[in-house]
Amino acid sequence: MVTSMTSPAASSDREKVVSKLPGWLRQSLKVRAAQHGIEIQTAVEQSIRDWCNLASATASVDTSGADSFSTFLPPGQWESFRQIAADRRVSLIQGLAQSIQLWLDSNPAPDVSRPEITRRIIVCNQKGGVGKTAITAGLGEALAEDSNSLYPVRVAKALTKALRDSEVQDEGMELDTNPLDVENLPGPGQQVLLVDFDPQCHLTNQLGATPLPMNGDSLTNHMAGDPKGDLRDLIVSIDDETFGGRLHLLPACNDAFLLDVRLSAVRAREAALERALAPLESDYDVIIVDCPPSLGLSMDAAAYYGRRRDREKPGESGALIVVQAEDSSADAYELLTTQIDDLRGDLQVDIDYLGIVVNLYDSRRGYIATSSLQGWVDIKDPRVVGLIGDLKEQKEAVRVKKPLLSYAPKSQQSVGMRALAREVL
Ligand SMILES: Nc1ncnc2c1ncn2[C@@H]1O[C@H](COP(=O)(O)OP(=O)(O)OP(=O)(O)O)[C@@H](O)[C@H]1O
Ligand SMILES: [Mg+2]
């Protein structure tokens, strides 16, 4: 049954059209329209226009199992489509399926955009337990998601809303994602390497991988100029089923506790991490380094690795600072930025700040939480690029040693990690 009727006020100058489409075609249309950043109704409008402009019908499309599909078209388009379909002796359902197949064929999925210079993101704060490891993992997972699938992403206005509400100190405010603030977007499809740069091996354990044994090869050995093999051989792939082989991890080893000591004997030691990782860069779009809670030589090496390179645009690589939405984080922040500023001056390099992620935010703590959030926002440069709630899914994912975004892909936390990924991209 095909009917058409006048549209409701919402899409004023279009008319609602109800027809049928097979599920697979509807899904392809949805994904492809999102990949091109256009609305489904616009894609259908183009589909029908192009099909009508052909000299004849195209190859027949299997429409078995087609069920209800509705959209909004410019007035009159459906009526002339109906005429042309009748002339071509195809049913409206077949004509619509052919139109959409034609559109899919002439609008292929765009290529994933890849940076010319592998981006290096240094996740840091010498204050312990603020969520560096959680953010490293979540950000990497979000960046590796499939470019041919759609995922719920919290759009920027959710952050704006939290801030507006915090200004009026509305204690009843929930960070709970309003469905209106969530959009289904294709994954960035990036090739991601997570580097567990913390001797505690938290990231390694959290993702269900095994820390490297003490007597074998490790990043520490490579940084100390004493490699025992190819660093590539130490890398493991994380949850291929979800991330399609795009998410990799360089596990940590307890020997990193001795890194600062071993580095003290190394020439140009601030460049040690760069020397070790440079051979891997051609395999990746993004390398994310999960730093330990300390401000030693290893932090210097990490910050140096994130410096802006020749021909690299500002803000492509740099330091991502994770803080907690509470005042005690502010002192730690001062210490960290002072160290990074000193390094900039001493070595004459540019180290950009990619932003501040406010983690473990809990609006139920009322004024303490909201006023501190406002404090972070007031820094302005670097700006707040992510706001992640204090939620149970993170702890559960750690407990079961699964990546958060495959353990709870629709959770608010995952939705927020994806928003963060799109802010830093
Ligand atoms: N948004 C969150 N909601 C709930 N729990 C969280 C969140 N972020 C982190 N956690 C939990 O808080 C603890 C500390 O987080 P995490 O290990 O990521 O911090 P860290 O800064 O890397 O710590 P360290 O300084 O020891 O490396 C972990 O148990 C983690 O699962
Ligand atoms: Mg950590």
Image (spheres, helix red, strand yellow):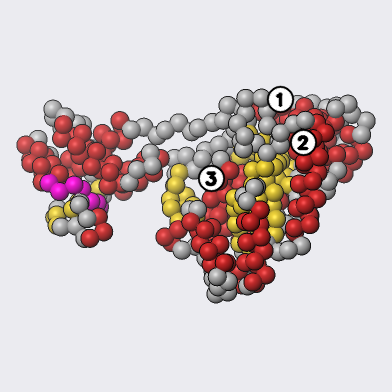
Q: Which label sits on residue 384? A: none
For residue 282, above or below residue 177? above
SS for tag 1? helix
Q: Nearest the camera: 64 or 201? A: 201
Q: CA distance from mark 2 to mark 3?
A: 27 Å
Residue that numbered label 3 is attached to: 422
For the point 60% across and 69% down, the residue is: 363
Q: Quadrant of the C terminus?
A: top right
Q: Are marks 2 and 3 in contact (CB under 8 Å)?
A: no
What residue type is disc 3 on? Arg
In this orientation, does residue 403 appear? Answer: no
Q: Nearest the camera: 255 or 131? A: 131
Q: Which label sits on residue 344? A: 2
Label 3: few (<14), some or many (≥20) within 10 Å? many
- Residue 25 picture location, percent across and down: 30, 43
What residue type is disc 1 on? Pro
For the point 64% across and 66% down, the residue is: 371
Q: Nearest the camera: 13 or 243? A: 13
Residue that numbered label 1 is attached to: 279
- Residue 214 picture location, percent across and down: 86, 40
- Residue 366 picture location, percent across and down: 63, 72
Residue 73 sits inside the magenta stretch: yes
Q: CA distance from mark 3 to mark 1?
A: 27 Å
Disc on the earlier residue, 2 or 3: 2
For the point 74% across and 43% down, the residue is: 196
Q: Which residues are magenta?
A: 68-76
